[in-house]
Image (tube, rainbow, N blue to C red):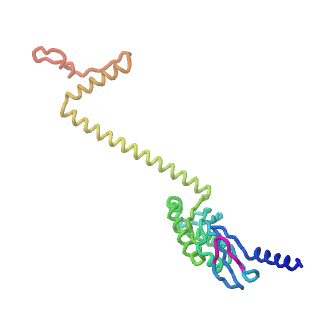
Amino acid sequence: MFIPQIIILLLVVAFLLSALRVLNEYERAVVFRLGRCIGAKGPGLIILIPIVDKMVRVSLRILTLDVPNQDVITKDNVSLKVNAVVYFRVVDPVKAILEIEDFLFGTSQLAQTTLRSVCGGVELDELLSHRDKVNSQIQTILDVHTDPWGIKVATVEVKYIDLPQEMQRAMAKQAEAERERRAKVIGAEGEFQAATKLSAAAEIISQHPEALQLRYLQTMREMAAESNAATVIPVPLDLLNILLPRKGSGTLKE
């Protein structure tokens, strides 16, 4: 007499196991009832009708998509390889399941073609020096195309740009020539500033001749303080005329 009760109990347990589903906080379930979508459910505990209902789990967390190396010819005809990384998330689980068969594969293919087209439309210098602008342009294009799929592209980053060896050597020569040019310009500016200061000093000394004598004495003091060795210093005749007593109107002559 207990056999029917046991069978009923087993049927109830089997029904609960097939009807109850637990979804995490970051998950949603797109439920199909007899092939017709009735919406997204979750998170937490949801109840499905066995055999009648079918669900597809969708994660709402940010997904990381690695875009493999793409062969690109830039606007100035430079061949290179570029790869990138795309961060995106599903914002509408129903669209992500109904509008596209595999949103992850579709986003990957779209990211590859967009990376090639955007990098092929700019010059190499712009790609290297304005990478943020290129990232923003790729993100905008991806976001527009994936919006009907219920996907939001958060960030796109160009990771690595592989240049040919010939181009690397040419860029190294260019950088070296630029450094030499800057060094010569800086040296010329220094000479110009020094000449300007010396010209100003000469003008001041020409207006005040005694300043030359003071500078001469200061130079002698500095030379005497640096070394104890005997030093021969030429003495201008004008200085001797000042120091020696005058007899009549006679002065030292060369």
Which quadrant is home to the N terminus?
Answer: bottom right
Q: Over which residues does the magenta segment extend?
A: 40-48
Taking depth in this image into account, of 141 and 212 the one nearest to the observer is 141
* Above-or-below relation of 227 to 205: above
Q: Where is residue 9 in the image (x, y as percent from the top left)?
A: 82, 76
Between 85 and 35, the one lying in front of the other is: 35
Looking at the rendering, which quadrant does residue 232 occupy? top left
Q: Is the magenta stretch mostly helix, strand or loop?
A: strand
Left or right, 237 with respect to 21, comes to left
37 lies above or below 226: below
Please name whichever residue, 126 or 33, is drawn nearer the observer in this view of the structure: 33
Which residue is rendered at x = 16% and y = 18% of the image? Answer: 251
Most extreme residue toward the front, as rendered? 1
Is 41 included in the stretch rendered in magenta?
Answer: yes
Q: Which residue is found at the position 26% from the left and 38% from the top? A: 199
Left or right: 225 with respect to 121? left
Say whether residue 45 is left or right of residue 117.
right
Q: Where is residue 127 in the image (x, y as percent from the top left)?
A: 53, 62
Q: Residue at x 23, y 28 (%)?
A: 212
Counting every numbered tag in the picture gives 0
Observer-nearest of 232 and 178: 178
Left or right: 221, with 131 as reference point: left
Q: Quadrant of residue 146?
A: bottom right
